[in-house]
C-alpha cells in the first residue's frame, strides 16, 4: 500500500457510471416489478452501497476510507439499466475506487437478479465520470 500519511486530509468526491444492456422483455419485467428475485433497481442500489463501503476488502491495495457519503442510483433506459454512484470521504487519498466498485457491484446484482430471464445481458460502459478534492475549510465545522 502507498504511504499517504504525509498527505493532508481533504474532502474527496468521485462519481462513476455503468450500464447493463438487457432484452426488451427483461426491461418490461423490471418496470412492472415482476422479476422473481424482487425489486431489481432497489436491490441493486443497496448492493452498490454495500459494495462501495467494502472496497478496501475487495481490492488488495486500497486504503480503508472513512466514507461520509455513498449514493447509488439505478434507472431504466431504452436498452437496460444505468447505474450512477457518488462517493465522498474526508481523508488523504481518493475515493474513485469506491465509486467504481459501487457501480460494478450494482450491475452484477442486476445481472444476478435477471439471469434466469435474460441470457443476452451485457455489462458495459463502467467508467469514472469525475473526481475532485477540496481543502477542508476550518470555518465549516
Image: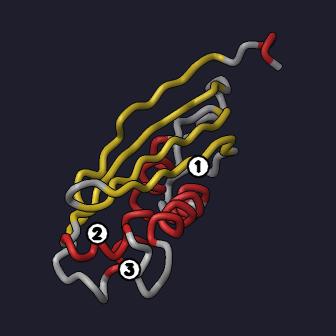
Q: For mark 1, what is the residue?
A: 63
Can you say which quadrant of the picture contains the C terminus? top right
Please indicate whether residue 105 sits to the left or right of residue 123 in the image. Answer: right
Is 9 rendered above or below residue 101? Answer: above
- In front of the other: label 1 or label 2? 2
- Report the label total: 3
At horizontal 43% and vertical 87% (from top left) the residue drawn is 36
Is 26 rendered above or below residue 88? Answer: below
Mark identifier at residue 112: 3
At horizontal 52% and vertical 36% (from top left) the residue drawn is 94
Please indicate whether residue 3 sits to the left or right of residue 120 in the image. Answer: right
Residue 61 percent coordinates (x, y): 50, 54
Residue 56 makes an appearance in the image = no
- In front of the other: label 3 or label 1? 3
Is 17 rendered above or below residue 29? Answer: above
Residue 133 percent coordinates (x, y): 54, 23
Name the foreground residue: 78 vs 3. 78
Amino acid at each position: 500500500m502507498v504511504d499517504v500519511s504525509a498527505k493532508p486530509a481533504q474532502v474527496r468526491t468521485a462519481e462513476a457510471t455503468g450500464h447493463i444492456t438487457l432484452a426488451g422483455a427483461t426491461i418490461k419485467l423490471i418496470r412492472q416489478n415482476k422479476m422473481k428475485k424482487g425489486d431489481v433497481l432497489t436491490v441493486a442500489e443497496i448492493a452498490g452501497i454495500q459494495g462501495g463501503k467494502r472496497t478496501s476488502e475487495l481490492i488488495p491495495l486500497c486504503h480503508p476510507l472513512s466514507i461520509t457519503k455513498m449514493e447509488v442510483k439505478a434507472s431504466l433506459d431504452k436498452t437496460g439499466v444505468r447505474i450512477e454512484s457518488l462517493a465522498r470521504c474526508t481523508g488523504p487519498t481518493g475515493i474513485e475506487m469506491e465509486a467504481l466498485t459501487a457501480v460494478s457491484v450494482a450491475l452484477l446484482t442486476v445481472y444476478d437478479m435477471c439471469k434466469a430471464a435474460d441470457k443476452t445481458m451485457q455489462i458495459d460502459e463502467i467508467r469514472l465520470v469525475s473526481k475532485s478534492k477540496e481543502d477542508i475549510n476550518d470555518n465549516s465545522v
